[in-house]
């Protein structure tokens, strides 16, 4: 197994790296299986003709029941949340909205955001978080000449959830400026501290997916929701020429998943909560400075010499972690806890052993 | 069924329009079923984790056997040919290739090309065909300040196939200028006049799909092939942030389709050839001026007053045809003959009846 050069370490360095003895806190992929209902359509499915660009009507009808004031016309089904964000940003970049061609995002950020913005023709602008949550003063200053903001609560990579008051204030700021809010809520069903708060407004675009809630990552079925019918029409027009319909069988599986009893989601949340408790407590016990994870399945401790940490931990202890630098946060590392309790425990043990060998715990300095 | 306003007629006007008595020469969708092999994986497939962004290795290995000097690294599996073209154009637009940010395309063109170019940040430049085929003199003039050209042989909408000498000359022109050739060969297995000629060169990007050959349109599995490893790397980098892996089950089905005996394709070609013969002869017998279809499943006759023709033919005779104007050719209409002989015969009969009522056949004037 070749990991390339230390200084060029990237998430793709770990692709295909596997083995019985490896503990991976790397990839953001649920390890739990999709709901059995999702598979029921597979054996006899035969219709592989083109589908509607906007997405299967029945699936959009099912989603309309989950969003207020919505009809099937308020949705576009996409190749995962990634394409939903890509299409929304491209449409916004080509349009004549207010502000410059800039999009504000919190830092640490999901590693794709700056790239997706750049590819769409928008300049990413960053607002650094306070303790992993939005700093409204800085947000208010930076947003003034932006055309859009990306909100990601619960957040990958921080695992933090924004206060409802913060989200309400952002609704107001965005509405006053007439700018777009792209709310990436792919972890909306994985919140440990409260119910999800759906950001609302005339120029809100909510981005979601079947990947995390239903563990269907490889199917690539996501969607965007908006009451801005002009934006919806522009997204459909663009998708007509850039990818056409989202794969038809994945949509059938997603439709089946919407019929899964709510207990499926509730039971999963309890599994995630136990993992969250274990890893958060474990990292604190190791003396690491970290934010309490409130949603999603990530935790982001501060460490000294993060590159050494990630490199040595893998090479000497077979534990995969990701550099915070990939998410705009150089002093930290990201751990995904999408693995069972036993493995989390084992991984924590190895991290402890490594820290002991290295003779250093967390940095005593704080950001 | 509402068709909207005559002057705003578009392909989407016909979406969802169906009925027992309608003959549709509209959509470019094969009516034949996918090979049975493609379905075999469905009943027991369970792995819906993220896949490689570049695409499943086994599928790329199977494709490498079909392209000269290729390895699995020469391919990226995409959400249909549409995404392959979109990614290639976006990467080319962002790169520092020669020429201006312009892409040359033949007219009549596949209706998405100008839009996809525009969305990617490239200006579409048109070279009008002679009798539906590339006019090399005009091509040579127009290509000089372009960064890329799109070649589509067999062509949707013309049904024409370029002479091998023309394609070789284009290879030379592109190579001399150092520009990209995007060769959309999604109809490569539907040629009535010769074997397919694969355009070659260091900056050639071949775009293909499982949609037409294997009738898997709704699955959205296509790919691009290139020996330009820098372009491949850039496409993978972009796809990482804009859509991630192509849906994993569609790729499994595509892999199964590559194992289909060659007789599947040969038998289908004979079905298409019989349809081609029937519709071409039928249109000539009706006095319409049309190019002989040499590949794909389209035919593009000249008609007087095309908007009346398409509108009245649908409203009075329940026959769907598409306006040539949507493909950059205002004096013509496009007919897709992806339907069985009996229906083609019935459709021709109705067109004949309409022409008789209208009291006019084809235009005597020529383009």
Image (spheres, coloured by chain):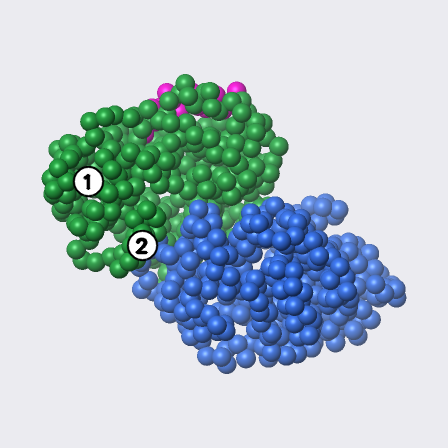
Chain colours: A blue, B green
Q: Going 29% across and 54% down the picture, which residue do you hit?
A: B3
Label 1 sits on residue: B275
Q: Dot 2: few (<14), some (14–19), or many (≥20) neighbours within 10 Å?
A: few
Residue nearer the viewer, A25 or B297: B297
Q: Is residue B30 left or right of residue A324?
A: left
Binning the other alpha carbons within 10 Å of mark 1 as few (below 14), some (14 to 19) or many (20 upward) gives many
- Which one is nearer the viewer's eye here, B312 or A298? B312
Q: Chain of mark 2?
A: B
Q: Secondary structure at mark 1?
A: helix
Q: Nearer the viewer, residue B9 or B98?
A: B9
Q: Chain of mark 1?
A: B
Residue occupying the point 60% across, 78% down: A195
Up/down of A148 relative to A199, above or below: above
The residue indicated by pointer 2 is B4
Per the model, the C-alpha gap separating discs 2 and 1 is 31 Å
| Magenta part, dominant SS | helix
Instruction: Say whether marks 2 and 1 touch (CB < 8 Å).
Output: no
Q: Which residues are magenta?
A: B161-176
Image position, residue B171 (x, y; %) = 45, 24
Image coords of residue A335 (percent x, y): 69, 64
Looking at the picture, does residue A68 appear above or below residue B331? Answer: below
Q: Residue A97 location, x and y as percent? A: 59, 53
Could you say which quadrant of the image residue B282 lies in? top left
B69 or B186, nearer to the observer: B186
Q: Is residue A88 visible?
A: yes
Is A92 on the left-hand or right-hand side of A292?
left
Q: Residue at x 83, y 63 (%)?
A: A367
Which of the labelled discs sits on residue B73, or is there none? none
Image quarter of the N terminus of chain B: bottom left
Camera-side mark, 2 or 1: 2
Is A121 placed left or right of B108 in the picture? right
Between discs 2 and 1, the one toward the N terminus: 2
């Amino acid at each position: 197994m070749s990991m390339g050069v230390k200084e060029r370490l990237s998430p793709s360095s770990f692709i295909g790296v596997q083995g019985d003895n490896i503990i991976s806190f790397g990839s953001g992929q649920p390890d739990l299986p999709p709901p059995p209902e999702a598979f029921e359509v597979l054996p006899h499915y035969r219709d592989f003709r083109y589908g509607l660009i906007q997405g299967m009507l029945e699936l959009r009808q099912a989603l309309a029941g989950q969003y207020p004031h919505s009809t099937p016309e308020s949705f576009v089904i996409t190749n995962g949340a990634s394409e939903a964000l890509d299409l929304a940003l491209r449409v916004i970049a080509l349009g004549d909205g207010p502000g410059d061609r800039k999009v504000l995002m919190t830092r640490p950020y999901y590693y794709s955001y700056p790239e997706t913005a750049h590819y769409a023709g928008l300049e990413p602008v960053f607002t650094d978080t306070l303790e992993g949550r939005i700093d409204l003063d800085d947000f208010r200053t930076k947003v003034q000449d932006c055309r859009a903001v990306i909100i990601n609560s619960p957040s990958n990579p921080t695992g933090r959830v924004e206060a409802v008051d913060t989200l309400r204030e952002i609704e107001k700021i965005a509405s006053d400026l007439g700018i777009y809010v792209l709310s990436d809520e792919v972890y909306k069903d994985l919140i440990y501290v409260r119910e999800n708060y759906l950001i609302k407004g005339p120029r809100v675009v909510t981005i979601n997916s079947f990947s995390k809630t239903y563990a269907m990552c490889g199917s690539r079925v996501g969607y965007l929701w908006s009451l801005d019918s002009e934006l919806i029409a522009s997204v459909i027009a663009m998708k007509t020429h850039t990818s056409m319909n989202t794969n038809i069988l994945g949509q059938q599986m997603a439709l089946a998943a919407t019929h899964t009893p709510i207990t499926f989601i509730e039971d999963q949340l309890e599994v995630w909560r136990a993992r969250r408790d274990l890893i958060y407590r474990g990292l604190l016990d190791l003396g690491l400075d970290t934010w309490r994870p409130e949603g999603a399945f990530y935790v982001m401790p501060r460490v000294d010499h993060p590159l050494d940490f990630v490199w040595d931990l893998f090479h000497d202890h077979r534990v995969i972690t990701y550099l915070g630098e990939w998410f705009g946060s150089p002093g930290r590392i990201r751990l995904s806890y999408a693995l069972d309790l036993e493995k989390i425990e084992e991984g924590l043990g190895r991290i402890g052993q490594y820290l002991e060998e290295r003779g250093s715990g967390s940095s005593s300095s704080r950001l």
